Image: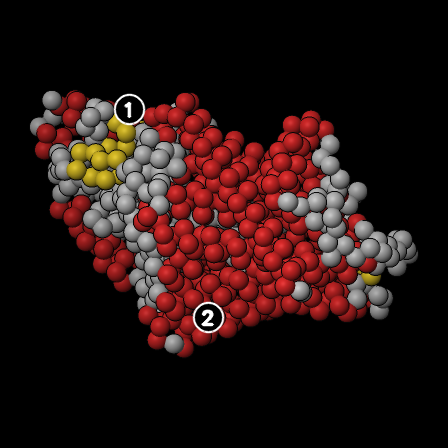
Amino acid sequence: MKGDAVRHLLMVSCRTVVVFTLLTGVAYPALITGMAAALFPRQAGGSLIGPDDRPVGSAWLGQPFHSARYFWSRPSATTPEYNAASSSASQWGPTSPALDSAVRVRIATLRASGVTGPIPVDLVTGSGSGLDPDISPAAASIQIARVARARRVDSAAVGSLVVRQIQARTWGILGEPRINVLALNLALDRLTQ
Amino acid sequence: MTTNAVAQVSLYFAIGLALAVPLGRYLALVLDDGPVRGPIGRFLGPVERLVYRGIGVDPTEEMGWGLYARCLIGFSVVGVFVVYLLQRFQGWLPGNPDHLPAVPPLLALNTAVSFVTNTNWQAYSGETTLSYLTQAIGLGVQNFGSAAAGIAVLVALIRGFRRAERPTIGNVWVDLTRAVIYILVPLSAVLALFLVSQGVVQTWRPAATVTTLEAGSPATIALGPAAGQVAIKQLGTNGGGFFNANSAHPLENPTPLSNLAESIAILLIPGALCFAFGRLLGDRRHGWVYWAAMAVILVPLTFATTAMEQRGTPLLAAAGADLAATSTAPGGNMEGKEVRFGIAASAIWATATTAASNGSVNAAHDSLTPLGGLFPLWLMQLGEVVFGGVGSGLYGMLCFALVAVFVAGLMVGRTPEYLGKKIEAFEMKMVALVILVPAATVLLGTAVALMTAEGRAGILNPGPHGFSEVLYAFSSAGNNNGSAFGGLNANSAFYNIILSLAMWLGRFFVAIPVLAIASALAAKKTIPVGEGTLPTTGPLFVGLLIGSVVLVGALTFLPALALGPIVEHLTMAAR
């Protein structure tokens, strides 16, 4: 290839990158941002909940809960836990000794809080993001007695609150039944204020 | 496996097929030679012509494979420079509301190569490393450009089969432009808006601060223009997450419905291109042959992965966790998985994203069970031809078709031919490159990493699983997938350099031989179908095709797999 041909080729390549950048790096994101702001402003901004000047969280992001008065979230692998500025999973393999000891400690903590029956696996394993907002309905059920005791309310009232917070599978097929822990705990605070 | 899991997997493939067939028809329309016909041509044609004016090319100029390849490499090299420089200078550039500093040089190089080669390996961590501007005009643009490059090479190869006695294979600028304007941008825009409606963020505002409920302390929530990026990274088999946790992150994939849309998008264009191929060849049965061969490999592996993950692990059971799947709990191996997706939707994603060279994840692959992780690993090692990357999957599979007709030809002692073209020594040599370069990259790269202290230093999990982490990394980079066993710390000088090299080899040492095949085929006469022609539209050929892919994949990688996931499974089961 002669020098001229190389130069021509590089010029065309550069111009293509520039034109594609205008199209897919400027116009496309601008279009999506504009339409998102017009059609779904709340979702586009992170689905924040609570008062505008002092939001309590995002509807989609989990938070840490350790007091007996609140339902607990799943373990989180981020630093510190539930750090929505830096998502990550534990990356522990299926035979990892670190996973083994972590799960045993978590189960011991739950037993110490008064849980006697089976402990659903999702409540003692970390999620893929470290920000999982949900626990399974079974994982909420085993916490009802503790929360009711700590708040000195009837456990049936807490139980019916939990049932109301269950989100079913989409179309009865997709995903898993689940409970958003932050939403449940906010409802709990409203119930016992 | 639960009834619901069977229903989720079945629904996934049913919807995928139902969308791929009509989309294939559309792709054939816009990728055919000559101006795009119909209303879409009238609507987007002016934009297309404006692009040609902007880049200063004559869309009717025909190229041989050498020029076509040089232009593709020129386009890619410029892309690497742009993405590299954007990362290095993001601290001084606008669109950086959270004031992220410059990305270190080797990480910036790795990320640039990764996105230009359609791999999207994540040595970076989106929300803590890259500014909004870098994401949008660096990574985002390459998400489109690299996907378009895959489609372009495929279209060139299809021309090789369609043309006779003329060694040119089209114009690369036209093919790139059309893929972007008619296919990638419109589909991404639709998907992006749907994702925002579900809760995926799309904003240029800085990170939000909230006051947490229990502690009452301030917490930062990373935001950004994610939805547009997520849409193309799913559709363009790119896979690089806006956030570190990729599509496991709730703001990148908040609901089971967003998850369905994103996981369908993984296989959508690779599946539809099969049907477009059939139409462009003038015989739709060819399209069904490829879709069927791919599905016959993928569907059983998806069920198998789901079953392994639902079974859980002896470790979790022995520790005292309840692994039963009930109407109120997902059960199974939930480490690294999100509750809203549970087992089935995570397993479907894991196999789809590795069958296609997508590499996005909605669960942590490093935490999959040994066999649940083996199937995704092997799907990558098959050469990313089971659906594979947009364009690159089908052109890889067409190379395996040449292997199939070649083997069949040897068995009956006739000159092999495919689609009216004699398959001769030159084509087979190029096919050998296409198959051997990624395989050698994977195995030699793994060996080098394990023999050096720098390579071993990145390993997180002990024992055979640590070996799997390294094997997975090279399988992913060498086949341009991009997913990872994330425990491996790949952000070191050693991995940033060697994996960049693997990604570059795996991309261009496949694409360039394919272009050479395209030119060689285009120059040949088209011979009519005769008595001795191997029928290539029926189940027999589907079987031959699957046999070629699976045999090559099994023979090449079984020894390596035995050292990692297989031995881990056996020792785990023996506990």
Q: Which mark is residue B446?
A: 2
Mark 2: secondary structure = helix
Callout 1 environment at 10 Å: few (<14), some (14 to 19), or many (20+)? few
- Residue B372 shows in this picture: no
Q: Residue furthest bottom?
A: B451
Q: Tell me, yes or no, whether dots 1 and 2 are on the same chain.
A: no
User: Residue B475: horizontal and vertical position, in percent?
Assistant: 50, 62
Q: Residue furthest front?
A: A4
Q: Is residue A8 above or below residue B459?
A: above
Q: Which residue is mark 1?
A: A164
Callout 2 environment at 10 Å: few (<14), some (14 to 19), or many (20+)? many
Split into 4 quadrants, where in the image is the C terminus of chain B? bottom left
Rendered residue at 43%/36% (across/down) = B227
Left or right: B419, with B465 as reference point: right
User: Which residue occupies the foreground of this view, B312 or B269?
Assistant: B269
User: Which residue occupies the foreground of this view, B319 or B134?
Assistant: B134
